Image (spheres, coloured by chain):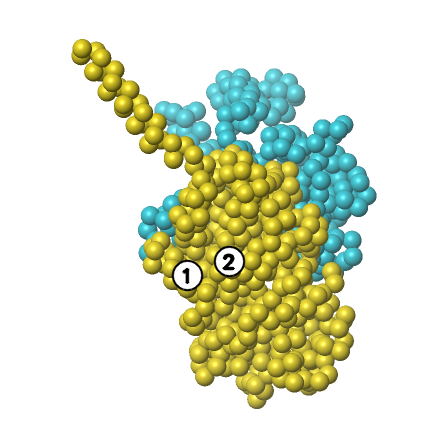
Amino acid sequence: MDPAGIFATSFARDAALVRTRPQQIALALFLIFLLALPILFGPRLLAISTLILISSVIVLGLQVTTGYAGQINLGQAAFMGVGAYTTGFLATKLGFPFWLTIPLGGCSAAVFGFIFGLSAVRIKGFYLALTTIAAQALFHFFVLNLPWFGGSNGLTLDPASLFGFAFATDISIYYLCLAVAALMTFGAYGMVRGRYGRAFVAVRDDDVAAGIMGIDVVAIKATAFLVGAFYAGVGGGLWAYFVRFVAVDQFTLFNSIWFIAMIIVGGMGSITGALVGVVVIKCIQEAFVSLGPSVVSQFPSIGGDVVFSLMNVFLGSVIAAFLIFEPRGLMHRWNILKRSYRTWPFPY
Amino acid sequence: MKSRRFKWIAGAAAVAVVTLALPASAQTTYNIASIADFTGPYADIMKDLVGARRATVDWWNEEVGKGMGIKIGIKDFDGRYDAAQTASLWPGIKAELNPVAVLGVGGPDVAALQGRLPADKVPMLMSTAGYGFAWKGDPWIFNPRPTYGHEAAGFFEWFRSTRGIKGPLKVGIISSEASPAYVDIAKGAEKFAKDNPDKAEIVETIFTEVQPTDLTTQVGRLIRKGVQVIDIQTNTAAVVATKRALQALGKADIPIMMSSHNGLIASGKAVGGMKDLEGDYEVYGMAVPTEQKTKAHDFHQMVVAKYKSQATWSVASVMGYNQTLVALRAIEAAARKVGADKVTGEAVRTALLTTPISADQTFSILPNLTYTNEAPFPVKGLTVNVATIKDGKYVIAAENVPVPTIAKW
């Protein structure tokens, strides 16, 4: 909903993502903040920010598959792993440059995701969730037993490089992740507001009605998985260049559940919500990591095991609380606040 | 007159300040980053592991460092046993501490930092056994113990000779594909058997779920193949399920061999009592924390009494002692080579690769260690210790059992 007095007088204006001057200013300030982040903050916060950017790309994909198209996906970490391994394989064994390995990593993950997307044609809900868990198990099995991925040895990568410049420092890898995340975010906004996005929402809300309206439900469900897995694969490629080592146990079901938690907290069916969810969950995790040792040293009688349990209990409670009290996530709450502000003092 | 007296007093005060400050300024402080797992799956053993690290640093500062003009600072960081977490922590650690060495917990720390440490020129010391997949030259990450495969092979040889077994020892391996580390552990033992068919034969490697509940069928198969010892270096759940299966099949006398992280004490608690593990074994290349009087135990008691260590005498504390002692002895050696005020991470690594660390230097917590550039762990001259449950008591069965050579797999 636009503020009072804002009318789209042209198609371009109507289709614009950023619709008002304050929005443009806010976006510009936010981008300046992101660009200046390495100067403003220390290396620790910079590394956290890099991880947030990588996770954002992966969670954006999950948002498309689950939040927009309504297809439950508990295999996003496996899709990420496929991207990371493909990137690692192409970089180490074939010597491909990073600007090729990352998109190809995304493509291979997309193919893997598409296969599971096909199963979504016939099944939904609980059964689809189980199928995507199978993706997780299959990924694990393939990586350990196929000869190209190093098996239990994993893959070690050199830093990404472009025209002789190596993205080997924390700052350079941050900017690489920022550039990719910005591109992927822009792409996600564009897609969900376009024809495919509307088809995703229609299928999510009622796939029978969507089919009657002329939407190719089979293709849309498979496409949702394809797109979501592509994002995960690109995120996996970034992860591979960030850590420079890829091993199968970096992509677990537990990670997939965290990704789901992020879209629940941020808000299902919102690109901004996905980004907010990543930031909130990562910040809570980092807060625990930073506070945990201090709590243990101040109160040794509590013990590290209690602190660990407390973290899981707290994060579990956050997710449960959101599901009970605000199932549409923080973005819904934000939109209510925004609307109230815009219509104040009138409730309509 | 007043002014002259004031000058005298001021001069004397300045001399006193400089004199008092001299010893302090002569002491150089270096930092060690202590990566722990306060909020991850191993949080319950961190009290001992981190306590042992801190106590060892306190002891070294007081009894070794002071004489050399070096003080070691140690700071804990919570890596949560998660590669992503360690990767996000590392840039901050480097900027904040500028450490000359890092103490790691496990595989995720290796995964997160193995690409970074050579560029940052900081060595990392682990406390666990090594892995085949990390067996690469030019290491920056060091294990004080050989691979789990080496440790198992040492046990196979000892067990075979102790029992007077003429042919190859028939070994069954119970592992899981849930973790690449578990797969690698099994591969190491398989490699030893493959290269030494007269010494060991792997009757079967069984890959089960990571936390198995019932292994009766699988263990029955091993029994039918004449298994003489079952090698489980994964976790306590696998030990419990195997023991229950052996009991159900009336073959509880077939011994199980465990490692440090799923050893007799931990598995005994899980299985319901130490008496159930009578005649079973644990093997690893570091001191066994029994109540028997050993040099290692004496060292532990000394740091508890003198440096108020909170660590109890356990496998976790032995792991904390082993990696910290190696780090400190390497710093010591580096300081002797380059000077007490010129120690860097690179110098510490060079010292590790060029200066053997004797068992005496580690209070027999570790055997003699000689690192080379060909592997992250010493590949020759290693020994392991074997512990067992005898008459319901946790005791050392054998010490300094030689580890056979295994080719890289």
SS assignment at label 2: helix
Q: Residue furthest right?
A: A94
The quarter in which the C terminus of chain A is drawn is: top left
Tell me the crowding category of disc 2: few under 14, some 14 to 19, or many 20 or more residues within 10 angstroms, Cα based.
many
Residue A5 screen position, x and y as percent: 50, 17
Q: Residue furthest left?
A: B2
Letter of the chain that mark 1 sits on in the rendering = B
For residue A307, side relative to residue A170 (left or right): left
Q: Residue at x 32, y 51 (%)?
A: A299
Q: Which residue is mark 1?
A: B300
Kindly tell me whether residue A222 is visible in this rendering.
no
Q: Nearer the viewer, residue B187 or A280?
A: B187
Q: Quadrant of residue A143?
A: bottom right
The CA span between labels 1 and 2 is 11 Å
Tag on residue B362? Answer: 2
The image shows residue B223, relative to residue A239, as above or below, that is below
**Which amino acid does the dot numbered 1 rest on?**
His
Q: Colour of chain B?
A: yellow
The image shows residue B253, relative to residue A74, as above or below, that is below
Q: Residue at x 22, y 16 (%)?
A: B6
Residue B377 screen position, x and y as percent: 63, 56
**Which amino acid does the dot numbered 2 rest on?**
Thr
Residue B121 screen position, x and y as percent: 61, 39
